């Protein structure tokens, strides 16, 4: 798949899914702004992997919840690489707790990174996309945004809000050649998942998934690259579920 001569900025690009998206976009000919929050070492690895594909790439430390930080990093990417017309928001985290034990601080943390972050990033990206009359905005969501997850009520709420933003914004910018979609993975084999679940819990989870296994980050990344192509410009406002038939 080829998306030559485009520039992307990707949040959460030091994580399992974000890193896979960055490297696969690079292999498709996209210059990449690799945005990370804490893991600079991993981000630099991803930058090198992108460059190994013959494209330009740089790492940028970014807190997606802070408006000034988002604007500053966008300008840095613009001056380093050019106008980013592809945005992939893959940054995020979950916090597991019973609803009645959830704190207001948890609520704000999850809504800020998933919803406020998406708002700030998309609003910052849109002016150049509108100017170019071409753009791709892709939010990495979750199965829980559609079906809900017990003990992850706040995370599910944030992802559900992201689905609403996807559908509404897609309608608003459609005539300008900009598509807005969300990719909603199920259980994906990442370092974070392995840290959260025991081997026995992972085996039980795999038995619940119709295809009998966890997803792979590169499978999610392939869908993102697919959505960035010119040939998929008729796909917009969609939440694409990638969960092995679990939903």
Image (spheres, rainbow, N blue to C red):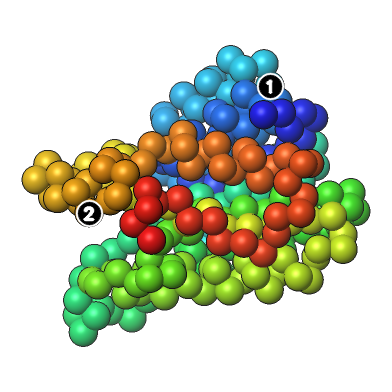
Residue 246 visible in rendering = yes
Q: Residue at x 62, y 17 (%)?
A: 53
Relative to 122, is 74 above or below?
A: above
Count up the numbered dots: 2
Relative to 225, is 204 above or below?
A: below
Q: Residue at x 51, y 50 (%)?
A: 90
Picture quadrant where residue 3 is located: top right
Q: Mark 2 sits on what residue?
A: 208
In this image, 92 relative to 10: left or right? Answer: left
- Describe the element under mark 2 as helix, strand or loop: helix
Q: Residues within 10 Å of mark 1 (few under 14, many from 20)?
A: many
Q: Residue at x 38, y 66 (%)?
A: 144
In this image, 156 relative to 138: left or right? Answer: left
In this image, 165 relative to 190: left or right? Answer: right
Rounded to the nearest angstrom, the CA distance separating label 1 from label 2 is: 40 Å
Picture quadrant where residue 27 is located: top right
Q: Residues within 10 Å of mark 2 (few under 14, many from 20)?
A: some
Q: Position of residue 84 (x, y in %)?
A: 75, 43
Residue 57 visible in rendering = no
* Disc number lying in front (1 or 2): 2
Relative to 219, is 200 above or below?
A: below
Q: Position of residue 36 (x, y in %)?
A: 49, 43
Task: Check residue 139 in the rendering and tell me which mark sits there, or answer none.
Answer: none
Q: Position of residue 102 (x, y in %)?
A: 25, 78
Picture quadrant where residue 237 is located: bottom right
Q: Residue at x 46, y 34 (%)?
A: 218
Q: Mark 1 sits on what residue?
A: 55
Q: Position of residue 234 (x, y in %)?
A: 76, 54
The residue closer to the viewer here, 200 or 32, is: 200
The residue closer to the viewer here, 63 or 10, is: 10
């Amino acid at each position: 798949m080829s998306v030559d001569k485009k520039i992307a900025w990707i949040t959460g690009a030091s994580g399992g899914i974000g890193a896979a998206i960055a490297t696969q976009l690079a292999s498709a000919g996209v210059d990449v702004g690799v945005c990370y929050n804490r893991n600079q070492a991993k981000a630099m690895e991803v930058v090198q992997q992108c460059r190994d594909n013959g494209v330009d790439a740089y790492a940028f430390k970014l807190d997606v919840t802070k408006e000034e930080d988002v604007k500053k990093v966008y300008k840095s990417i613009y001056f380093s690489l050019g106008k980013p017309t592809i945005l992939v928001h893959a940054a995020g985290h979950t916090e597991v707790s019973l609803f009645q034990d959830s704190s207001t601080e948890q609520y704000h943390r999850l809504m800020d990174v998933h919803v406020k972050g998406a708002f700030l990033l998309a609003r910052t990206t849109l002016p150049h996309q509108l100017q170019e009359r071409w753009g791709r905005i892709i939010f990495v969501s979750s199965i829980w945004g559609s079906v809900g997850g017990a003990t992850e009520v706040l995370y599910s709420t944030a992802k559900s809000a992201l689905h609403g933003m996807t559908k509404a914004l897609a309608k608003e910018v459609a005539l300008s050649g900009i598509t807005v979609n969300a990719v909603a993975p199920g259980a994906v084999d990442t370092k974070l998942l392995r840290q959260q679940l025991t081997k026995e819990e992972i085996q039980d989870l795999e038995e619940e998934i119709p295809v009998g296994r966890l997803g792979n980050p590169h499978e999610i990344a392939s869908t993102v690259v697919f959505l960035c192509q010119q040939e998929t410009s008729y796909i917009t406002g969609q939440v694409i579920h990638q969960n092995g038939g679990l939903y």
